[in-house]
Image (cartoon, grey):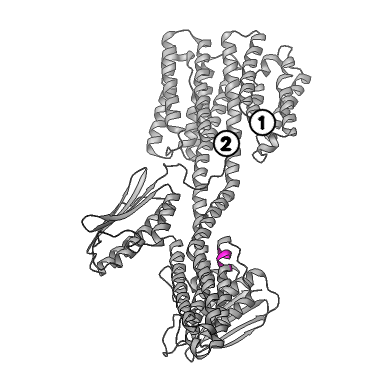
Amino acid sequence: MAAGLTPARLVLAVASLGALLAIQLLYFSRPSVDMQALRSRNGYLMLGAQAALGYLPLLEFGQAWINMPSFLAGSVLLVLPRPAAWVLFGTIVAGMGAIQAALGGEVLDICYTTVGAALGGLSVFLLTSLARLVNELHLARRELADRAVADERLRFAKDLHDLLGLNLSSIAFKGEVAHRLVHRDPDLAKTALADITAVARRALSDVRSVASEYRERSLEQESRVAQSVLSASDVDVRLDLDRPDLPAEPLGVLATALHEAVANMLRHSRVRRCDITLRASPDVVSLEVVNDGAGDGDDPAAAGWGNGIRRLAARAQNLGGTVTAGPEAPGRFRLRVELPLPAPGGDAPVAEAAPSPQLSGRLAHGLLTTVFAGFGVAAVIHLFYLTESAGHLALTVGALAGILALQLGYFSRPTTVLRSRRSQALLVAQAALVYLPLIELGPNWVSLPGLLAGSALLVLRPAFGLPAFAAVVASIAAVRGGFTTDPGDLPFNVLATINTGTLVFGLTWLTRLTGELESTRHRLAEVAVTEERLRFARDLHDLLGLSLSAIALKTELTDRLLVVDPGRAADELAEILVLCRHALADVRSVASGHQQLSLDEESRAAHAALTAADVEVDMRMHHDNLPVQVRTVLAVVLREGVTNVLRHSKVEHCEITLRQQDRSVVLEIVNDGVRAPGERSRPARREPGGNGIRNLSERVSALGGELTAESRPGGRFRLRAVVPS
């Protein structure tokens, strides 16, 4: 300080620096302050205050304050929209060079100050933006998952409309026709009833098919099942499968394709040979299933694929892939599924949640490269202060180029495995490039030891990395202490090494963490979609299975009553129409994800379905106001329990009891369908996809309740749910 360090000037310097850092750290660099707040009136006022604190003290402190406007340069990039921010950033940096010139600096001083200002501003911007981006990615995880689930739910709705909506509408229409014809033309009414029965059974089959499909299949399991089932059918199976580590969604599509192909082959007794091939490259994965026994005119529709291949093609198309299926001469049929794969560390093909508009991955990497290259430029400028030797200059530039190449090409590359022997070996190579030129350069030694210190923190475990960092800093103090007599030179070099090393570690770590979080958020979205698919499959089975089963049963009953009791047949048809409307409401409920079932309506529907199946029903439902979630779960348990009863032709009597006791509500469904003494009944028989008791148990457990299913004396079976009320 030109006028000397007086107490008053010291207080002023400390107060000004403290205020400048407080604004930077507590406002501009705080991750919880979002971009909208930065670009508000308060943000611009803070920017003005920082400008005053960056420039006004220059009038008092001159050269000692020359680097402080660097904070303003970084904050400008945070607050102002591009390209205005970059224009003002360049103006601030150039202005600092002009100020250095006005303070009497030489050309080297001007260049050094200008480069330092640019590096300081970019470092502030990068550290702040990357820290904020990490925070935003944490906050965006749920949003991304919700958006991915919403997209999946839209696809659910389309599947439901295509598969069930038209069928249920057809049942309703034919039911209305049959209802009008019961008395006028029993023969035509009988034909309409036969159509209703066929449509209901087809819709029930579709429900089971879709519910099974939406449970993500395991490719490993499907390949084993394919080999076992086809071999048991005397088919010569030849599997040639790579074992790639694939994301969940492509694996699910490939497993579904294999399942569909095997199911299609089992419909053709002529198949004698099947070749299943899975190939994966860094960019694409493909599955081919080729079998013989196909007729010349076979096509996917005629070969029995139906809705299966259409849904498979739609899923593959959503991932950017293709599905081809068709005959090949002579008498062969080929299914080929080809899916693109994301690059390692790249984005998965799911809905994007927009990151901060201030910093993209490409821009962050470009700025990181600029900052590290700027360190090299600053070091070269520093060398010109010490020597004009061409040999020393060439040696220094070569060593600096090697250090930067290792840093940018390896240590700071997002895909590098840092904790490895290769990284440790290259760390030793970087240390050699830092220290070996010292032998020749002596007091003219200029290097980038801060990069070595930061890389040590990245590569070595903390127990070794921190001592290595400290050793690099200590070596700088020892070297500079042996060559300089300037009391300010030693702390300057030590602090510069600490600052650079910390900056290298922070920028590299944050850049890598941002990439990892980008990948993680997509995996989280995949998990959320998978959970939604499972929920959809469970709800589809639980909500629609009973309605469609009851429609089929009542249609058969109506057909038998049509001649002997037309009046009762008309009543049954009216109930079929009610059930159909109920099922249509369930379709909309499952698609929208808002199921709030009425326990009373389910009770009436259960009673009607059991009565239609000639089961004697004793129903006692006593409950006060129950929470919506409790009512919904109990309604689902009731529906699944009654569906299970309807699967047993031996059932003659069923008791359904709902009562409240203490702080819980108990639902019991008891039937007499277990006939053989000591025989274990299997009340919740399920399709291979796995429905029934497991789904109910998960739902009840989610509310803190308990579900039990057990055989009782006298050939009875009891399903009991206890749920806190």
Crowding near the residue tagged with mark 2, few <14, some 14–19, many ≥20 C-alpha atoms within 10 Å: many
Report the disc number at residue 130. Answer: 2
> Helix, strand or loop at disc 2?
helix
Quarter the C terminus occupies? bottom right
Crowding near the residue tagged with mark 1, few <14, some 14–19, many ≥20 C-alpha atoms within 10 Å: many
The magenta span reads: 585-590
x and y, in percent, of residue 524 in the image = 52, 51
Q: Is residue 488 left or right of residue 267?
A: right
Which amino acid, mark 2?
A: Leu
Tell me the residue that label 1 is attached to: 79
x and y, in percent, of residue 346 in the image = 45, 41
Q: Is residue 435 left or right of residue 279?
A: right
Front in this rendered view, residue 74 or 693:
693
Asked if one can make out residue 188 in the rendered structure from this viewpoint, the answer is: yes
Front in this rendered view, residue 591 or 366:
591
Identify which residue is drawn at 57% across, 13% down.
111
x and y, in percent, of residue 615 in the image = 52, 88
Asked if one can make out residue 720 in the rendered structure from this viewpoint, the answer is: no
Which amino acid, mark 1?
A: Val
* Distance CA(mark 2)–CA(mark 1): 15 Å
Of callouts 2 and 1, the N-terminal one = 1
Quarter the N terminus occupies? top right
